[in-house]
Image (tube, grey):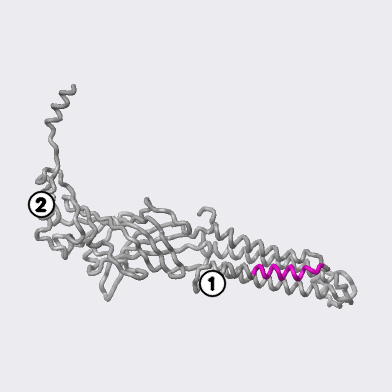
Amino acid sequence: MKAFLLILCSFQCVEGYSIKQKAQLHANLSSGYDRMIRPGLNQTVPTIININFYLTSLEEFAMEKSKMTVMGSFGLEWTDSRLTWNSTAFDGDLNQTSLFVSNIWAPYFILFNPHHEQMPILSGEQSCNVYANGKIFCLPSDRFVVICSNSIDFYPFDTQNCTLRFYVPGYLASDIVFQPLSPTIQMDYFEENGQWFVRDTKNYINRYIFNGIKVEVLQLEVIMQRRSKYYVFSFLLPTIYINFLQIFVFILPADSNERVGFSIGVLLCVVIFLTIILDKLPVSPDVSKFMTKLLWDMVFGSLIVLAVVLTSRIYHKEDAVKLPRFMKKILRIKEENTAVHPKKITKSLDKIFLIAFTTAIVLNISLYFIRCKLAGANLSYFSY
């Protein structure tokens, strides 16, 4: 049996090609080839470029600089009828080869909205796969730094939308047609970012008009949601805790000497915490709804201090205080005499202030979340 297999193997033909044959193929392909002319025997027919974009990482999103940095790769494919050959002439096995971009026509992709430096996507040092039927496939990778406008209106539940725009200068929309192979960016090889969650992506073509000339622009849209769990536990929940801590001053006995000190201490806590949060907030000309909430917290804290000072002053009066009837109704004092003991007035005021400030604080917190939700902010922070 072994002898039979040995004889059978000896009759097998081994297909392959030599380096000399490949060098000959390259010489044949480059002979008479003009890389300055785009592919297509009929130059009135546009060259179709199939496109995929593979996002590998979201490296940085600097809000204060309006800058987004991503790493990714383009999958570009087009047909050049000048780069075809008969594989049977090379022992039938030479179906594919690699050529440098500097030796063939390739779309000179430029980033339309760079943050600082404009660089081509396909450079001469890169190579592309060329197939016997004229198909060309390139997979250039790069680090893309783009300008990205942002808004902190819903911080820390904000969603940012950034777009990478690419075009090929020197060619009209009638010369080159971009054809995305997918309506979204490919995320198969994406490495998650610790601060931002990529919620959605879009891959589409837009046409821009410059001096009456139409140019095709490839737009890659990245929609990202801030991972807000850290900010909720570090900023939002502590501020809510401090809000409700302030109103406990009206539960303290009126003869306690710590009422004013307690209210001022909590107000200072609010101010210090506000200063800490300001250092952490992204620099932006916009005022976030979270900042508006904090400012109202400080206003309520100041009013609570004034209310405590007022009740303390009334409490320590020695003589009865004359009150008109409408004030007695507001304070719910049932005495028929116009003169009311200061302690009763203080007790009634404490109840009113407790209810009023509790309602105001609850409304302030509720309005913050309602305004964010109505404006489309994603409040499901535990998902990210």
The quadrant in which residue 299 appears is bottom right
* Predominant SS along the magenta part: helix
Residue 38 point in image, percent of width and height: 18, 63
Q: Which residue is mark 1?
A: 287
Q: Is residue 142 visible?
A: yes
Residue 188 point in image, percent of width and height: 37, 50
- Residue 91: in magenta span: no
**Between marks 2 and 1, how big is the CA–CA gap?**
67 Å
Mark 2: few, some, or many residues within 10 Å (few <14, many ≥20)? few
The span shown in magenta is 256-270
Seen in the image, is 100 located left or right of residue 336?
A: left
Element on which disc 1 rests: loop
Q: Which residue is mark 2?
A: 24
The quadrant in which residue 11 appears is top left
Seen in the image, is 233 located left or right of residue 205?
A: right
Q: What residue appears at the point 53 percent right and 67 percent down from the top-left corner?
A: 281
Residue 199 point in image, percent of width and height: 44, 56
Mark 1: few, some, or many residues within 10 Å (few <14, many ≥20)? some
